[in-house]
Image: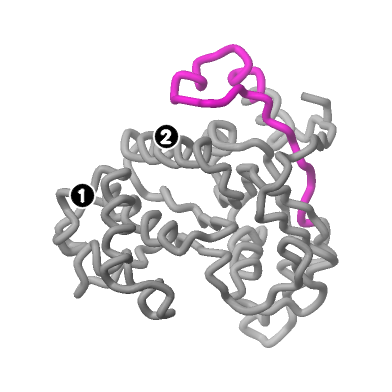
């Protein structure tokens, strides 16, 4: 399978460049374990970049390093040409587990980030929050608490919670994991619509082939160290996309060839 690189849209923020990155942990006996090693990769701006791979290959570690929640043992990350290290509002992460505070209403959860950084007034934050909640079909639930929401509603609220910070990069670490199939497909379409309207640079982590194919401009196939990024694969499905694209001939061709590549070791161009 060949790696394909095309020009990204001009004038967009969120160009991520990873240089010779390494991250090590200690096992239960205190021995070093290389999770990411000698990893260099380019995530272009304005694209929905999907990183997929089996459990334990370092996908979430890569996301945490980009978000600034971990420090690399080697190498560095650049965002739009500047080195990054600590967390910042230019890179917002949506986690696998809920990030909503149970004692706050949906609106209070969404506006928390800008208010704690003293970026805007409470009145301005509430206006922005309600615009986002309207967009995600949650305006009627703005005064509810997280335990009054379904799993899909919580995920939508968390995306609104991230977007109110106006990030340059969205990092989503298997955000729809554990949801039922219909809710998962609905949220995938929600995020696709958002992406196609904003071209917000996205790093989306998943272990699901169908999800990767449906969402991605590019799929970065990740495996265990030392060669973490195995391939970069262009997904040439047209945008805008709806779930109907998963029944097209091209989608099914891509899925078949990806399955051969991932599971049978066949190395042919797609």
Q: Which percent across, then down, holds residue 86? A: 62, 79
Colour scheme in use: one colour
Is residue 244 found inside the magenta-colored segment of the image?
A: yes
Disc number for residue 189: 2
What residue do we see at 19% from left, 75% from top? 103
When the figure is inspected, residue 40 is found, relative to residue 12, above or below; the finding is below
When the figure is inspected, residue 245 is found, relative to residue 267, above or below; the finding is above
- Relative depth, front residue between 222 and 65: 65
What residue do we see at 49% from left, 52% from top? 174
**Under tag 2, what secondary structure?**
helix
Q: Magenta part of the protein: which range? A: 228-254
What residue do we see at 56% from left, 73% from top? 88
- Relative depth, front residue between 117 and 99: 117
Q: Is residue 113 visible?
A: no
Q: Which residue is mark 1?
A: 139
Of mark 1 and mark 2, the one earlier in the sequence is 1
- The extreme bottom residue here reads 30
Query: Where's the N terminus, which quadrant?
Result: top right
Left or right? Give the position of 93 relative to 237: left
Q: Name the quadrant containing residue 31.
A: bottom right
Instruction: Please tell me how many numbered marks the rendered image carries.
Output: 2
Q: Is residue 147 visible?
A: yes
Q: Are marks 1 and 2 in contact (CB under 8 Å)?
A: no
Disc number for residue 254: none
């Amino acid at each position: 399978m060949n790696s394909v690189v095309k020009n990204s849209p001009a004038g967009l923020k969120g160009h991520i460049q990873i240089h010779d990155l390494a991250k090590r942990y200690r096992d239960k006996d205190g021995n070093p374990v290389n999770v990411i090693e000698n990893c260099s990769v380019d995530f272009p701006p304005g694209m929905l970049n999907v990183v997929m791979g089996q459990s334990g290959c370092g996908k979430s570690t890569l996301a945490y390093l980009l978000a600034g929640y971990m420090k690399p043992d080697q190498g560095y990350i650049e965002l739009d040409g500047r080195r990054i290290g600590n967390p910042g509002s230019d890179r917002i992460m949506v986690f696998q587990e809920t990030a909503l505070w149970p004692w706050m209403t949906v609106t209070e959860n969404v506006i928390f980030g800008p208010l704690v950084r003293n970026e805007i007034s409470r009145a301005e934050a509430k206006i922005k929050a309600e615009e986002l909640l309207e967009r995600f079909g949650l305006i009627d639930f703005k005064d509810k608490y997280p335990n009054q929401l379904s799993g899909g509603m919580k995920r939508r609220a968390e995306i609104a919670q991230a977007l109110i910070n106006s990030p340059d990069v969205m990092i989503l670490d298997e955000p729809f994991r554990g949801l039922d199939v219909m809710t998962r497909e609905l949220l995938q379409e929600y995020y696709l619509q958002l992406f196609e309207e904003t071209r917000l640079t996205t790093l989306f982590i998943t272990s699901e082939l169908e999800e990767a194919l449906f969402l991605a401009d590019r799929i970065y196939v990740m495996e265990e160290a030392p060669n973490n990024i195995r391939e970069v694969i262009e997904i040439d499905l047209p945008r805008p996309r709806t779930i109907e694209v998963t029944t097209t001939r091209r989608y099914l061709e891509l899925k078949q060839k990806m399955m051969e590549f991932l599971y049978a070791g066949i190395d042919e161009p797609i």
